[in-house]
Amino acid sequence: MSDEVRVSITSDADLVVARAEGRALAERLGFSRTDATLIATAISEIARNIVVHVGEGEIVMRPVDDDHRSGLVVVARDEGVGIRDVDAALDHGYASRGGLGLGLPGVRRLMDEFDLQSERDRGTTVTMTKWRLRDELERLRERRAREAPPPADLNGR
Amino acid sequence: METDSATTQSPPPADVDPALLHQLVEYLRQNRTDLREEWARRITDAQLLSAMTPEEIFSEVTAVYDNYVDALETGSIETLQAYARDLSERIIPRGVETHEVLGIVLLLRDVLARSLFVNYQHDADLLNRILDAYEPAANRIGVTVGVSFVDERERVIREQQESIHELSTPVLQVRTGLLILPIIGVLDAQRARQLTEQLLEGVQRNRAKVVVIDITGVATIDEAVANHLVDAVEAARLMGASAIITGLSPKIAQTLVDLGVDLSMMRTVGDLQGGLEEADRILGYRLSEDEAESADLT
Amino acid sequence: MSVAVLHHGDYLIASIQSDLSDSEVLRFRDDLVKRVGERRARGLIVDVSALDVIDSFVARALRSVAVTVRLRGAETVVVGIRPDVAIALVQFDLNLDPIRAALDLDEGVALLDRLTERDGHNGV
């Protein structure tokens, strides 16, 4: 099942959609309510940056897995002018001094992994991930599914 | 958790002769009484569903049988699924186990298949075609019932896990409006996150105005944990509760200072006793700067 | 309707009922400030319990309301911030002064009563 969700960001109404989609996907992937809220909040901030500073862009969210953890990756892309001073933008002090900033230090705290690539006049891509540990029951279920797939002839020869 | 079973939304097999299926369904309906009784008898002989009385068994047998035949007829297993979930919800607390549920489903298949053999043995070709119609549908139904049961069991287990988790929550209401969170042992980031959630849920549930977080029993904390602690204090304030940290050892106090945590933003008191007295002071106030201050978000 | 505003004596109670877009947030902010002025309200309660997400923008808008109405002599209390929302919000490390917070409407009104009594008037 393809769980990738794309939200095109062109207006502030799209932020409402992006928040809701982010939460829905997080819950579908088994994240707790708190984590779903953290994810939705991070998405909201990042999406707003796109609307306010660039005008249009895209947010793509999808699940990601490794042995012990399940995760949700959010990639926010725009093709705007880029962030001039990435270090400053990521610096807590800068953001609170100016009163505005890009809210990025907060976003970084909300998520577990955070990466920002920005190139002048080419655009900015933010990739952020939240993880959750899979519990025993879940891993058992997955193992069962892997080892004994449903019979092929359930619905006909 | 929703079942992701492959059987959920599939339509009936395209190559099944509807006339045959209809014939099969009619047969099953006409012989309903005999087949149900046979099935109930086989269940008892096999000593399955021993947690239920014969009357109960017969009643469930009837419901499953009818749902089974409906599912065969319509190709839609939704009603059957709903019934299977309902049945599972009822019998799991009675101690019915997975092997019993699978056992009775397999017995039903056997009872019906044998009956078909007996009835159509004069016409091998027709028997074959009837079985072709019966087999895949019967498989799907059996899996549906089995999976519904297992899903329900897993849901119950998960609920029980959560209950255990909640029961072991260390957030205690001392008196109206006052919560204590005594933390003992190793405090890592994950535990700190959990405790923060439990604390805030406790504030909400108990309508607490003051929470005393006692870390006498904590030897050291690292930066991540210190941040969680600060977050917990500030988040509690956003819910109208002031937090008092007690039992701060000199070592931890130094760690916090080194990390740049502004201790003047946190109310800290030497020990738990002092913290409770401070809490009483806050709760007891009516018209004072101090209480209004305690609700401030600074 | 996304926002409901009620009067409770000298107080205004604004209840946000669904997720608002940024422009709706700003309209809401301006509208509230106006109403507080018109009614000469002594206190404002903003109920955000229906909000699943409160990010830095909404927080700043609320703060902006609080600062402005404070100039007109009204205190602002935000109520209904859920645990998960509170945890998210504190990640932004914002100074939300002079906003105060209470658990719910009842607590919010009680807090406003105490705050306005302090000033020597009654909040009825």
Image (cartoon, grey):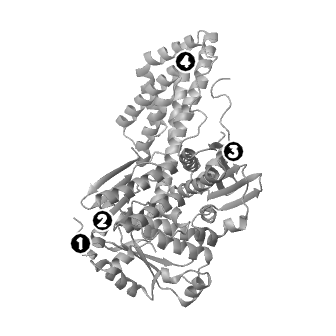
The one of C121 and B169 positioned closer to us in this rendering? C121
Query: Residues under labels 3 and 1: Cα distance?
Result: 71 Å
Q: Residue at x 47, y 73 (%)?
A: B233
The one of B227 and C44 positioned closer to us in this rendering? C44
Quickly name the residue at label 1: C121
Q: Quadrant of residue C101?
A: bottom left
Res C46 seen here: yes
Nearest-to-viewer mark from 4 and 1? 1
Quickly name the residue at label 2: C42
Chain bearing tag 4 is B
Quickly name the residue at label 4: B116
Secondary structure found at label 1: loop
**From what the image shows, is residue B142 above or below residue B256?**
above
> What type is the residue that disc 2 sits on?
Arg
> What type is the residue that disc 1 sits on?
His
- Asked if labels 1 and 2 touch by Cβ distance under 8 angstroms, the answer is yes
**From what the image shows, is residue A112 above or below residue B124?**
below
The image shows residue A13 at horizontal and vertical percentages of 54, 44
Query: Residues under labels 4 and 1: Cα distance?
Result: 89 Å
